[in-house]
Amino acid sequence: MELLVFHLPYNRAGLEVIKKYYSIFDKLIPAWLGAAADGSIRIHDDAGTIHQYMNKKKIIPMVQNLELSSRVSNSLVKDKEAVNRFTADSLAYLKKRGYEELCLDIEGVKYENRESYTDFIGRVAENLYGAGFHLSICIPAKTGNSKDSTWSGAYDYNKLGKIADRIIIMAYDFHWPGGPPGPIAPINWLQDVIDYAIMEIPLEKIYFALGLYGYDWPLKQEERGRGLVYRQIAELAGRYKKEIEWDQESRCPYMKYEVNGVEHEVWFENRCSIESKLRLLQDFQLKGVVFWRPGQEDPEVWELFKDK
């Protein structure tokens, strides 16, 4: 199974992991490009640093809608001139920089723009393939062909699976900071996402993106959760002398603690939870796993790939 990782430019913790473990990564997907509503591309990269460890054949530059704004993504996919500009600019970027593949992570598309998004991906793919390049796309996880979800409904697994070379399903944030506490990617939900994905997308194209982080929810209704990396969670456990507990149903670790009279619940990923997920992906013979993202993880996660 292939191992891919995302990367945020100039992220010091991420760079340290890449420096140490680059030899086990099949591909690096750095978020170097931002797409504006008019289709123009903003470049923000640390290529000079990354190229010390990864050659261009192992790098897939990623384009995200600027600030992951839903307004930007919906304007972009509906505007033919913007789509033309984006297609031309992305192709020019690949030719100039010498990369072989582009990854599109266009988030927040509304269900009403489902066809426009699919057409947008098709147009980009047609131009890239015609020039000898490849295309990956990141899409939200879902367990059915939903028609009412503003988050995942616009992403037509079946049609997209016929277009792109690589489909990366973002299988995290089942529980998120704006909702109640719980596992970020429970194993039973992951199983349901896989069951749906393999019915709609060719098996050899499916990659699952897994998170490496955690969330800390204060158990007060008006407060949102906050994101934590594994190091911060370990520090909290030490400071409040709390044991890490294991939820067998979701196969995820969690911890509870109290500060200033407010109870907190923390859910996260560690080596054990990631190992359970990897075993499931391997059982289905999926093409690969993609981690969001190095620098956030339980360091022992990389031990799972020591024999790669």
Image (cartoon, rainbow, N blue to C red):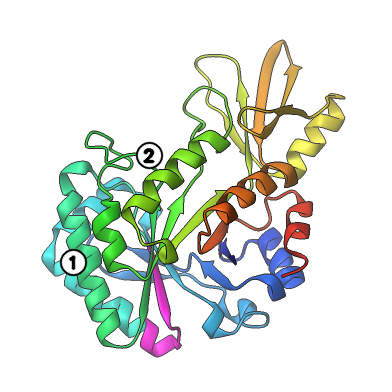
Question: Is 110 part of what is drawn in magenta?
Answer: no
| Quadrant of image for the N terminus | bottom right
Q: Position of residue 136 (x, y in %)?
A: 39, 68
Given residues 175 and 3, the one toward you in this image is 3
Please provide percent x and percent y for residue 104: 37, 64
Q: Residue at 52% across / 67% down in the picture?
A: 30
Relative vertical location of residue 87 with respect to residue 148 in this rendering, above or below = below
**For residue 27, above or below residue 231:** below
Residue 173 visible (yes or no): no
- Of labels 1 and 2, the one closer to you: 2
Residue, disc 1: 82
Q: Position of residue 18 (x, y in %)?
A: 69, 69
Residue that carries the numbered disc 2 in the rendered image: 143
Q: Is residue 241 left or right of residue 13?
A: right
Q: Specify the segment rendered in magenta.
A: 94-104
Identify the residue at image location x=52%, y=54%: 284
Q: Does 278 sit above or below residue 60?
A: above
Residue 55, percent from left and from top: 59, 84
Q: Secondary structure at mark 2?
A: loop
Q: Is residue 137 left or right of residue 287?
A: left
The residue type indicated by label 1 comes to: Ala
